């Protein structure tokens, strides 16, 4: 009995070690997940999936859809991890990003690079062998466009960085469409154009609210180089242009009234927020515009997807 009493304390260090190991595993898992920028990737993958469904009149092939979604998602996550690695010094200067795994020291550069490379290689293998080579090639170009061309060069070279670099973020609908059909269709390019025009007002709204942080990190975002007043005007002009561009799917016969009504309502809502930014000129309104822009894109693509299948629902 006496020996058993003394044996109990001896187990406590072992138990505490097990608990710490579990905590470390959980923390590590969360850090690697954060490298993938899941909120951004989910939006990108959603637009890719919409492209897949729009590519055919009925249901797309399940195999191509599943492998295409997985490959595109992993490639986007790889690009996000590379972005973390390249931007780690700038991230440490900004309150919005200083909690990321590299600035906090939770992960090191080697961890991140190996993780990014593994995701990228797996993504390319899936797309080449289970989808088609064209989708793999376009996805790889998008990865390079965001992770290398935008992050290393454009982001630090010109206040038009997000305008030019937005092409990489606009690619997923084309990738999704190509994953199903193996070709680049003009209608897929219309979806690309919508996201391409949406990106500047979306990101500039955030940049206006966080302009002091971007200035501290020496990143030449438009509100840093040209001032918030000029940027707010550009946001308004781009939202007007976006409304016009979103009419193209209807005007080309790609979609019908459900999409048209939705595009007009959502577009006018975006213009309203842009006007409010000019009137109020505060960071709170800028952040409201930023969050609206995210919901705007999701609802717009959901509307065009519903519009695509509505005639099928009626016929059945």
Image (cartoon, grey):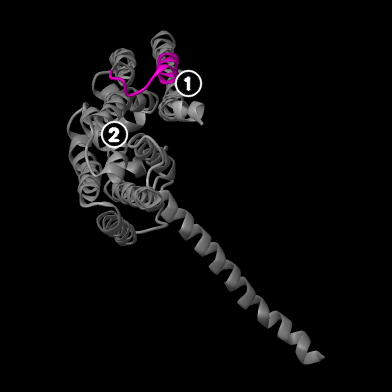
Disc 1 versus disc 2: nearer the observer: 2
- Give the image location of residue 221, x and y in percent: 27, 28
Residue 206 showing in the rendered view = yes
* Residue stretch rendered in magenta on the structure: 252-265
Residue at 29% x, 18% y is 248
* In the displayed structure image, the side of residue 60 where residue 149 appears, left or right: left
Label 2: which secondary element:
loop
Give the quarter of the figure containing the N terminus: bottom right
From this viewpoint, which residue is outermost toward the front? 315
Q: Indicate left or right for 100 with 173 as reference.
A: right
List the residue tagged with mark 2: 170
Name the residue carrying label 1: 284
Q: Earlier in the sequence, mark 1 or mark 2?
A: 2
Residue 260 magenta: yes
Q: Main secondary structure of the magenta part?
A: helix
Q: Is residue 231 above or below residue 302?
A: above
Left or right for 302, reference 175: right
Which of the 4 quarters of the picture holds residue 151?
A: top left
Tell me if mark 2 has few (under 14), some (14-19) or many (20+) residues whose alpha carbon lies within 10 angstroms of its own: many
Please state which of residues 79 and 65 is positioned toward the viewer in this rendering: 65
């Amino acid at each position: 009995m006496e020996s058993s009493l003394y044996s109990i304390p001896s187990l406590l260090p072992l138990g505490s070690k097990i608990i710490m190991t579990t905590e470390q595993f959980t923390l590590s898992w969360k850090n690697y997940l954060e490298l993938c920028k899941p909120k951004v990737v989910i939006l990108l993958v959603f637009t890719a999936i919409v492209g897949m469904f729009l590519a055919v009149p009925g249901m797309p092939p399940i195999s191509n859809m599943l492998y295409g979604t997985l490959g595109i998602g992993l490639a986007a996550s790889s690009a996000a991890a590379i972005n973390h690695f390249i931007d780690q010094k700038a991230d440490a200067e900004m309150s919005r990003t200083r909690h990321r795994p590299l600035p906090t020291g939770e992960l090191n550069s080697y961890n991140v690079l190996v993780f990014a490379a593994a995701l990228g290689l797996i993504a390319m293998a899936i797309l080449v062998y289970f989808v088609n080579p064209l989708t793999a090639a376009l996805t790889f170009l998008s990865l390079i466009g965001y992770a290398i061309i935008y992050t290393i060069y454009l982001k630090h070279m010109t206040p038009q960085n997000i305008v030019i670099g937005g092409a990489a973020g606009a690619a997923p609908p084309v990738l999704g469409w190509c994953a199903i059909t193996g070709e680049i269709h003009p209608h897929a390019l219309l979806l690309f154009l919508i996201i391409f025009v949406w990106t500047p007002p979306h990101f500039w709204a955030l940049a206006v609210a966080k302009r002091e942080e971007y200035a501290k990190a020496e990143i030449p975002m438009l509100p840093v180089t040209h001032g918030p007043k000029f940027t707010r005007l550009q946001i308004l002009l781009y939202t007007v242009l976006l409304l016009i561009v979103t009419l193209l799917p209807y005007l080309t016969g790609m979609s019908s009234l459900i999409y048209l009504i939705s595009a007009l309502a959502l577009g006018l809502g975006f213009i309203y927020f842009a006007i409010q930014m000019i009137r109020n000129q505060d960071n709170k309104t800028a952040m409201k515009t930023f969050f609206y822009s995210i919901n705007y894109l999701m609802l717009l693509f959901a509307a065009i997807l519903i519009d695509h299948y509505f005639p099928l629902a009626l016929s059945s």
